[in-house]
Image: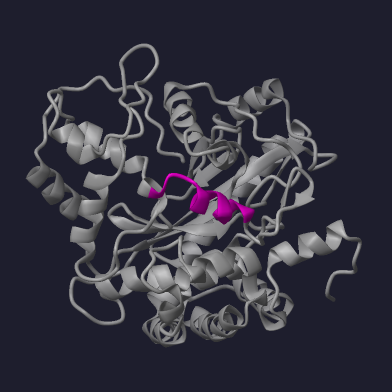
Amino acid sequence: MSDSDSGCTEQRSLVTEAEVEALVRGICFKTGPPRTLGVELEWHVHELRDPRLPATPARLEAAYAALRTLPLASSLTIEPGGQLELSSAPAASLMECVGSVSADLDAVRATLREADLGISGFGHDPWNPPTRFLREPRYDAMEVYLDRFGPEGRSMMCSSASVQVCIDAGYEEPGPLGYQRRWWLTHQLGAVLLAAFAHSPLAGGRVTGWRSTRQSLWAAMDPGRTTAPELDGDPRGAWARLVLNAPVMCIRADEGPWGVPGAMSFREWIRSDTPPSRADLEYHMTTLFPPVRPRGHLELRMIDAQPGEDGWLVPLAVTAALFEDPEATEVAYRAVKPLAERAGALRAPRNPLWDAAARSGLADPELREAAAVCFAAAAEALPRLGASTRVLDAVAEFIDRQVARGRCPADDLLDQLHGKDLPA
């Protein structure tokens, strides 16, 4: 959602289908030793005195103007509904990433506090209806396009927030850290991460029936751009086919509104009388929103925004451990392999496994069992990755409070809604 584009002025270099496939293969799966890690954090901005009260557009404008003066290591962007996003620079280690983002968050929170504003992490705004804050051609066109499929697109644009963990694609060679294994693992382990970190059971103050309402929105939207490619065979070829066959969301313009075509795939655009350029291809790929998106690295998009000041640390640390530590990777692979049978032939997130993860969280017995094994392996691996006491304690507390009890953060929010005492 942060892949904004302020204009389209360029020297047009038209592309053929063969060139598109070659470019996609070269751009999206860059292999090598896993050395870097990143995280993208989205937050809802609200009145400090009450998180149920969204900040007015005027107060958001002033606050973001102040935030843009900060010397942040992360890039700061604004989502269509006014959500704030911090995207870390690629870090050489887990603790480098944690330290950099923590410092940026401290500065952001302090600046917002001066304006009597705060931030909170929910996968979907529990109380307020979706309201556009940004009025830009990209988001105007996106809204028109997604409205064709129902109201979920507007909610996704304006009311959702996530923790997106970015990992290297892995080695070219086979093995636990090879890119083919990692690609497969992201889609099976992704359901476990979705279930464990689900934190969006409410919309408009009402229970939706989903632990992750945010994920239910993605599953209900345009399947041509939100469904994973086939996992059998070559990941590069499968992703290239998805890119070519995905519908074109919008056609950029130097001035005025952007065009919103009818049902036209990128492949059909190439074959038209006015074919796209390489820049159009690169932009088209930013409008694809599968659960895992290859962008030279792998961007895991299924994790809801988390509660508390340090809640984001846990999905970052656990995901890093399960993909960067060879022993933990192998344990996770064995733990989630049986889940692939439950997913069946349908692609994520539109299969029974992902549906259960979004709907039930860790109340689902199979997902709870897999999560217990994976989180234990992550906790064991984190000291080998140099994790600090702060990170280790946050992960241990999450395991005791949530995973061991078959719960996720959404269950805490539901308990609060119903006036129940939270687990000690």
- Left/right placement of residue 338 relative to residue 423 reads left
Above or below, 329 against 123 in this view is below
Q: Quadrant of the C terminus?
A: bottom right
Front residue (pair 242, 135):
242
- Determine whether, in the image, residue 26 is placed left or right of residue 166: left
326 and 102: which is toward the camera = 326
Count the labels in the image: 0
Name the residue located 43 percent from the left edge and 26 percent from the top edge: 141
| Residue 219 magenta | yes
Q: Main secondary structure of the magenta part?
A: helix
What is the quadrant of residue 7 in the picture? Answer: top left
Q: Is residue 417 above or below residue 18?
A: below
Quadrant in the rendering for residue 62 = top right
Identify which residue is drawn at 40% across, 49% down: 223
Whether residue 317 is visible, yes or no, is no
Query: Which region shows up in magenta?
Result: 213-223
Q: Position of residue 90 (x, y in %)?
A: 38, 55
- Nearer to the camera, 299 or 107: 299
Residue 124 screen position, x and y as percent: 65, 48
Image position, residue 189 (x, y; %): 46, 73
Kindly identify the residue that appears in the image at 32 percent across and 27 percent down.
261
Q: What colour scheme does the image use?
A: one colour
Across and down, in percent, residue 271 comes to: 12, 33
